[in-house]
Image (cartoon, helix red, strand yellow):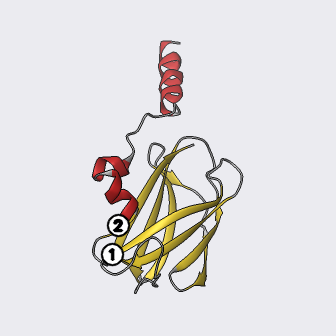
Amino acid sequence: MRALILLLSFFAAACARPDYIDPISRNGSQSQATDCPLKFTQSSLCASLDWVQGPQSPNESEFILKFWNKSSGTKAGPFVDPPQTLSVILWMPSMGHGSSPVTIEKIEDGTYRVRRVYFIMPGDWEIRTFLKDGATVIDQATVSLVL
């Protein structure tokens, strides 16, 4: 009986809503975060993530990614395509699993719509954005959120 109570307590604590520090404020000042919300260091690119729908659980969410050169652009443009293949993965670090694959659609130069974004349960999530050459990750940036 004691083992059952301990096990149930463990599961209840594992699904609790975590209290995380905003990773943007941890990595630099607010102005740096605003200038380059998603920093791709190896590629010298910045990106913004703007929600069209969501973030929400369990219904579909959708967002727009816009990329620009850190040295010659801003959040207002001009936008450029990353030189590598764009990949986005939803990951729930506290649970050790992700969600179903998203779909990525190029809208125009440097602008991509990410659909079929399903946060399958409330909790802490990461939107992991990768720039890949085949299966090799060249660069990456992560946005953390709690639903």
The x, y position of residue 118, in whole percent, is: 64, 56
The x, y position of residue 49, in whole percent, is: 51, 64
Q: Foreground residue, 138 or 113?
A: 113
Residue 70: assigned label:
1
Q: Foreground residue, 141 or 25?
A: 25
Cα–Cα span, label 1 and label 2: 8 Å
Residue 39: assigned label:
2
Q: Residue at x 54, y 41 (%)?
A: 123
Q: Amino acid at mark 1?
A: Lys
Secondary structure at badge 2 equals strand
Q: Amino acid at mark 2?
A: Lys
Secondary structure at badge 1 equals loop
Q: Foreground residue, 88 or 36?
A: 36
The x, y position of residue 23, in whole percent, is: 36, 49
Q: Residue at x 51, y 33 (%)?
A: 17
As drawn, 28 above or below 6: below
Q: Residue at x 51, y 30 (%)?
A: 16
As drawn, 37 above or below 96: below
Does residue 80 appear in the picture of this structure?
A: yes
Q: CB of mark 1 within 8 Å of CB of mark 2?
A: yes
Does residue 36 appear in the picture of this structure?
A: no
Name the quarter where the C terminus is drawn.
Answer: top right
